[in-house]
Amino acid sequence: MFDQCIAYLSNTNLLKGGVLITITWWAWFKRDNRDPYNREHVILILFSCIVAIVLARTLALTSPFRLRPVHEEGLHFLLPYGSTRATLSGWSSFPSDHAAMFFSLSTGLLFTHRQAGAFALFYSTLFIAFPRIYVGLHYPTDIIAGAIIGITIALIVNVYLVKNTMIQSIVNLSYSRPNVFYPLFFLFTYQLVDMFNDSRALVGGVLKLVRSIIT
C-alpha cells in the first residue's frame, strides 16, 4: 500500500504541481501592505520556472547520458509495487527537471509569503522529490542538482528583476485587460501543473508532421 501511494504521488500532476500552483494563485490574490511587489514576484516565479526547466532539460540533453536507477541493471533496483520499468525509458536522469522547476517555484513563493514558501519547499522535498527517488526515477544527486538550479535561478530572478518595467507592465495588464490576462494566466499555470507534457507532445507531433510533409 505504501509503495502504491508513493507511485501515485510520483505520477499524479494534481498532487505535485496542482498543490503548488494553487498556492501561487493564492499568493497572486493575497493583498497586504508588507510587500507591494507580490504580483511581480508571482510573474517572476512563472518566469523562473521556465528558465529552470529549460536549463535542466538542456543539461540533460548535453551532459553524458545517465541511466535512471530503475533502468540500471547492475544496480539491482527493487521495483516498488505499482511502478513500471518502462517509465521515462531513454530519458537521461541528471539533472531532475521536476526538482529544478518545483524548487524554483517554491523558492519564489518565499518572496510573497515566508510561511507559504517554507511549506512549498517542504512539500516539494517530501511529496515531489522523495517519490522520484523511491520509485527509481532519480538518484539523490539528480534531485540535489535540479534543486540547486531551481533555487539559484529563483533567487537571481526575484532579487534583480522585481522592479523591471516589463514585469510591471505585465502586472498592469491584469488590471487593464483582465479578460485577456487571466485566460492566458490560467493556461500557463495549467501547463506548469502538467510539466509542459501536453505542449511538448504537441510540438513533437507538429515537427513529425512537418518532416513527413517535407520528405
Image (cartoon, rainbow, N blue to C red):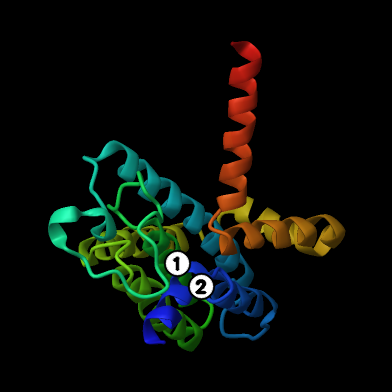
Mark 2 burial class by Cα count in 10 Å: few <14, some 14-19, many 20+: many
Q: Position of residue 30 (x, y in %)?
A: 66, 82
**Residue at which label 1 appears:** 102
Residue 16: numbered disc: 2
Residue 212 in the figure: left or right of residue 65 = right
Camera-side residue of 11 and 180: 11
Q: Is residue 190 above or below residue 1?
A: above
Q: Is residue 94 above or below residue 45?
A: above
Q: Position of residue 48 (x, y in %)?
A: 48, 57
Residue 51: numbered disc: none
**Distance Cα–Cα, label 1 vs label 2:** 9 Å
Residue 116 in the figure: left or right of residue 87 = right
The part of the image, by quadrant, that contains residue 58 is top left
* Residue drawn at 31 percent across, 44 percent down: 59
Contact, mark 1 vs mark 2 (Cβ under 8 Å): yes
Image quarter in which the N terminus is found: bottom left
* Residue drawn at 77 percent across, 62 percent down: 182
Nearest to the eye among marks 1 and 2: give it. Answer: 2
Can residue 54 be spotted in the picture?
Answer: yes
- Secondary structure under tag 2 reads loop
Q: Earlier in the sequence, mark 1 or mark 2?
A: 2
Q: Amino acid at mark 2?
A: Lys
Residue 13 in the figure: left or right of residue 183 = left
* Residue drawn at 57 percent across, 35 percent down: 204
Q: Amino acid at mark 1?
A: Phe
